[in-house]
Amino acid sequence: MVRIAAVVELGRPADEARALVVGAPGAPALAWLAEGMVAWRGDQRDEAARLLARAIDDVRAGSVVRAIAHVYAARLAEAAGDGKGAASHRAAAVALAAPDATWLRGGGSPGSPPPAGDAGT
């Protein structure tokens, strides 16, 4: 999953990320997340939205998988011009994230000072 995320976030071709996707029979939401990320990278928005929604809706997936799926769903909504939907997905991602998930809240690594203008709240 980490390699897929790295390829996707670095803007590498979707086919490169797709080659890394393997089935996860014991964790289908993880597979849906990976496939959704690859579909997003490949600009297959409908397929990405479908797969991410499956990961988001599967409460067995765990909060981390669901939070990451919300982050990508927010990107899809934003690309579609749906600012309200994007904000809703971002809020859901923050609600699911662990308290020290500064990567999600725009901060640095745990223990680093808060971003400028943030009193740490």
Image (tube, helix red, strand yellow):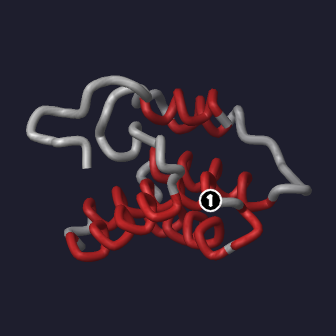
Residue 21 horizontal side relative to residue 120, left or right: right
Give the quadrant of residue 104: top left
Give amino acid for label 1.
Ser
Describe the element under mark 1 as helix, strand or loop.
helix
Q: How many marks?
A: 1
Of the pair 18 and 70, the residue shown nearer to us: 70
Of the pair 91 and 53, the residue shown nearer to us: 91
For the point 51% across and 54% down, the residue is: 97
Q: Position of residue 66 (x, y in %)?
A: 59, 61
For the point 39% across and 39% down, the residue is: 102
Q: Label 1 belongs to which residue? A: 63
84 versus 9 height, above or below: below
Give the quadrant of residue 113: top left
Q: Residue furthest right?
A: 26
Give the quadrant of residue 20: top right
Residue 19 horizontal side relative to residue 44, left or right: right
Of the pair 109 and 48, the residue shown nearer to us: 109
101 versus 111 height, above or below: below
Q: Position of residue 17 (x, y in %)?
A: 60, 34
Residue 65 horizontal side relative to residue 113, left or right: right
Within-10-Å neighbours for mark 1: few <14, some 14–19, many 20+: some
69 versus 6 height, above or below: below
For the point 33% across and 46% down, the residue is: 105
Q: Position of residue 10 (x, y in %)?
A: 42, 26
Q: Position of residue 91 (x, y in %)?
A: 36, 66
For the point 20% across and 70% down, the residue is: 83
Location of the N terminus by quadrant is top right
